[in-house]
């Protein structure tokens, strides 16, 4: 879902990381379940969530960073 949002907006970037290949990143972002969406290094969304939930978390992270 993050990738779809990144396609729609030039203000969103999405990267996917294979936790087994990059365990240091999995540790840094405390990945225990997948998917784990990290927004601006501060907001985390665990697992598959409805699009509205992810958008809400994105908007909250952006407004908190202003």
Image (cartoon, grey):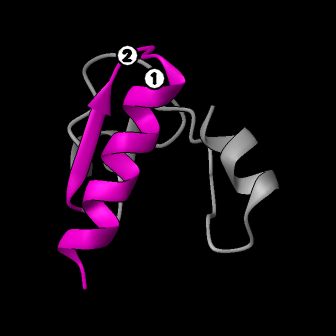
In the displayed structure, does residue 35 sit left or right of residue 9?
A: left
Q: Which residue is depicted at the point 23% across and 51% down?
A: 43
Residue 58 point in image, percent of width and height: 39, 52
In the displayed structure, does residue 39 sit left or right of residue 12?
A: left
The front one of 34 and 44 is: 44
In the image, residue 20 sits, relative to residue 58, either above or below, namely above
Give the farthest residue toward the bottom.
66
Q: Give the class, few, some or many, for how many residues have Cα within 10 Å of label 2's Cα (few <14, many ≥20).
A: few
Residue 47 sits in which quadrant? Answer: top left
Whether residue 22 appears in this view of the structure is yes
**In the picture, which quadrant includes the N terminus?**
top right
Per the image, the residue denoted by label 2 is 47
Query: Which stretch appears magenta?
Result: 42-66
The front one of 23 and 40 is: 40
Residue 38 point in image, percent of width and height: 36, 48
Q: Give the class, few, some or many, for how many residues have Cα within 10 Å of label 1's Cα (few <14, many ≥20).
A: some
Q: Which residue is depicted at the point 45% across and 14% down?
A: 48
Labelled pair 1, 2 in contact (Cβ < 8 Å): yes
2 part of magenta stretch: no
**In the picture, which quadrant includes the C terminus?**
bottom left
User: What is the spatial separation of the Cα atoms under label 1 and label 2, in whole angstroms?
Assistant: 5 Å
In the image, residue 35 sits, relative to residue 16, either above or below, namely above
Per the image, the residue denoted by label 1 is 35
The disc label shown at residue 1, or none: none
């Amino acid at each position: 879902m993050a990738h779809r949002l990144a396609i729609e907006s030039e203000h969103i970037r999405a990267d996917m990381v294979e936790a087994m290949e990059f365990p240091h990143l999995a540790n840094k972002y405390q990945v225990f379940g997948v998917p784990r969406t990290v927004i601006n290094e501060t907001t985390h969304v665990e697992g598959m969530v409805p699009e509205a939930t992810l958008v809400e978390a994105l908007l909250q992270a952006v407004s908190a960073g202003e």
